[in-house]
Amino acid sequence: MEHILVLTQEEPVRVDPGRLQELYTRLGEAGAEDVVCRAMEEIAVRLSHTERLYRQDRLCDMRKSARSLVAIADQVGMRALSRVAEDVTRCVDARDPVALAATLARLLRVGERSLTAIWDLQDASL
């Protein structure tokens, strides 16, 4: 019992550069940067809100919040975040509390890493 194994949970996340390029082509640099910045802010708010609703056991509202993350993440090319948010909605629909807890934790990890990835991508373009 003296050995404790610590598992680190890291998942690679990438931002779809094609989706971002499409935004920049369609909206121009200023317009695309505005959309990306607003999306990043909204994703951060929604992640926090989704977790809060889970802790308050407001699963119907939590599902709506996670569902909105799908559309926002898709808009800026965060495919992994979008997929995990969809998984959260499926867990709510299946009424599986164990899977929901695990998937929500994954959503928060992937969300944080996705925001960092897109922030780093924007910094690299400066």
Image: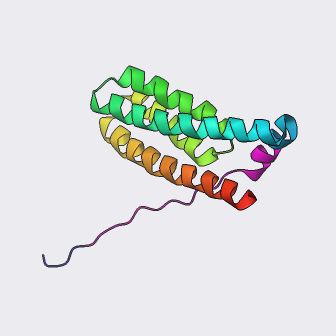
Image spot of residue 45 (x, y percent): 47, 34
Q: Is residue 20 magenta?
A: yes
| Quadrant position of the N terminus in the picture | bottom left
User: Closer to the camera, 108 or 44?
Assistant: 44
User: Closer to the camera, 105 or 45?
Assistant: 45
Residue reaching furthest right?
A: 25
Image spot of residue 59 (x, y percent): 36, 25
Residue reaching furthest left?
A: 1
Residue 121 in which image quadrant: bottom right
| Quadrant position of the C terminus in the picture | bottom right
Task: Tell me if I can see residue 87 in this picture.
Answer: no
Task: Tell me if I can see residue 97 in this picture.
Answer: yes
- Give me the residue at 71% from left, 50% from top: 16
Residue 38 in which image quadrant: top right
Q: Is residue 70 magenta?
A: no
Q: Is residue 33 above or below residue 7?
A: above
- Give me the residue at 34% from left, 32% from top: 52
Q: Is residue 98 above or below residue 125?
A: above
- Give me the residue at 53% from left, 28% from top: 67
- 68 displayed left or right of 24: left
- Give me the residue at 30% from left, 69% from top: 6
- 23 displayed left or right of 34: right
Q: Which residues are magenta?
A: 5-21
Image spot of residue 62 (x, y percent): 41, 27
Image spot of residue 34 (x, y percent): 70, 36
